Image: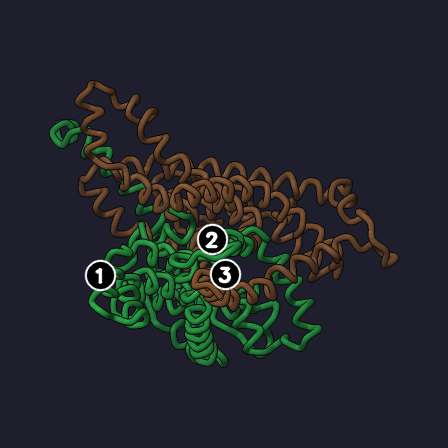
Amino acid sequence: MRWYLKAVGPKKIIEFLLLAAFVIFFMGPLLNLALLAFTGNWSYPDPLPREWSLKWWSFVLSRDGIAESIGLSFGIAAIVTAVSILLCVPAAYAFARIRFPLSRFFLFSFLLTHAFPKMGLYVSIAVLFYKIGLMNTLLGVVLIHIINVLMYMTWIPTASFRNVHTAQEESARDVGASPFRVFRSITLPLAMPGIIVASIFTFLSSLDEAQGTYLVGVPNFRTMPVVMYGIITDYPAYAGAVFSIILTAPTLILLLAAQKFVSADVLSSGFQMK
Amino acid sequence: MSRQAKRGLLGISLVLPSFLILVFIVVLPIIGSLKESLTNDGGGYDLSNYKFLFTDKLMRSNIIFTLEVTVISSLLVLAVSYVLAVYMRFNNGFAVRWIRRMYMIPIFIPTVIATYGLMQLLGNHGWASRILYHLGQDSFPRMIYDMKGIIIANLWFNIPFTTMLLGSALSSVPDAVIESAKDVGAGRLRIFWRLILPLTYKTLLVAVTFVFMGVIGSFTAPYLVGPNAPQMLGVSMEQVFGVFQDRQLAAALAFFTFLLCSFIGYFYVLSMIKEEGMRRS
């Protein structure tokens, strides 16, 4: 054993330990849920389950409201993404390309969505929504979901538009393209990766949102994370694990599909001005 | 109207829709909660709710607990992420390649799921305790329903995010600069202190800001894995509002947390505005 370690060298050993610590800490909880979801029964202190089964899948899928909650979550996430693109991408273009008074004030005002504690914000919003009759409405739920995404849906595309060199736009203008044409065939395609990343982020954040939906949307809008809270408290861990996989699968699939766009640089631009 | 004024008007009109939404769903509720927090039992306005926050024994211990968790989590996240990001920037072994492939996944995993996974893994008779049992370790430290649980959950959520921010900043430090520093005989430590740290400290500020804001107002993780008492302010806020039906006190709690976040946010915005100014000129 010792000669082997010596032959491998300290650098390799450090690398291995780092990777092991990383995988155990970050993947352990997810792996644990994946195991639990296919377990029939797992008694203490067995390190691995002895009985494998799919019975918790049929249990979860046969419960009322699960299928609806999945459809509802995706529907709401799609609406939230579409609305926030329409709201934020034009604003991002303005921040990147147009000089106008108070632009810094407007740009940084979106930080407010992260500065006020969400729970406090939702409580005040609930009070406001009661007054104007937005409780238990689709519009109310969509608005609640938009809070979480306004900032990076504006900031990431702003950074992407800024990274498009004005020289490219100007040379298109020089050969006679109209401003709209320049935007459509030069600026927008070049900024597209950022917009795609921001949209994915938005879609996933809407799928993930639980507290606000719970406060404003229940009983009419039981999305997947809201149902998850109920399952955690009412059912054995196996059922919770099955539902966790159903809830996480779309995230992983979307991430895999968009792998080539999702980079640290683009994502980071959602949290700072560079 | 001049061309410039027209452009300016176009700019404002493009920004206005999203700004109005912000006013409606964020600014108005914040003002509403400020007003609510200043309302006393008699319907008049004074600071009695805030006074209660700092004099009530339970509330005071909640505030101290929240600050402890937030500061410890932020420091640990920064330290671990910085080391990890620097290691990933200057090494390219198999471990780094694998970590690069995986480290963004936790950023996108729903909070409820990750917290639930941590509960199952680290809880009483969880997977970790079963494996340790077979390695001859009978007792397992209490992590879930304890401050440790909240801090571990915060590390899980924030280390990948912070490593991503720092990694992006470090990758913009050109290799050529570091090479030339080495050529003139600068040691590793010197390169770190004189070159890498100054080039990334602004990103550290960004990371501190978002980790601090994320942790101090968090609800899901402390609700699921935190102790019953003392509580994090997010959980306490929900309880004061939902169970005790005391809207004024809940609003005061929210506004107090907001003031703490604003303090950090102030430095963040200041540094960003400087950056903006440099870019424009």
Q: The brown chain is which one?
A: B
Disc 3 from disc 1: Cα separation: 38 Å
Residue receiving disc 2: B119
Residue B232 position, x and y percent, is 61, 47
Q: Is mark 1 on a helix, strand or loop?
A: helix
In the displayed orientation, state which residue is furthest to the top.
Answer: B185
Q: Tag 3, which chain?
A: A
Residue receiving disc 3: A148
Name which residue lies at 71% across and 51% down: B252
Disc 2 from disc 3: Cα separation: 25 Å
Tags 2 and 1 in contact by the CB under 8 Å rule? no
- Number of numbered discs overlaid on the protein picture: 3
Residue A241 quadrant: bottom left
In the displayed orientation, state which residue is furthest to the right.
Answer: B42
Badge 3: how crowded within 10 Å, few (<14), some, or many (20+)? some
Name which residue lies at 67% across and 50% down: B255
Badge 1: how crowded within 10 Å, few (<14), some, or many (20+)? few
Between B55 and B194, the residue placed more toward the observer is B194
Q: Tag 2, which chain?
A: B
Name which residue lies at 58% across and 45% down: B261
The tag on residue A171 is 1
In the displayed orientation, state which residue is furthest to the front.
Answer: B1
Q: Is mark 3 on a helix, strand or loop?
A: helix
Q: Is residue A87 above or below residue A100?
A: below
Residue B222 appears in the figure: yes
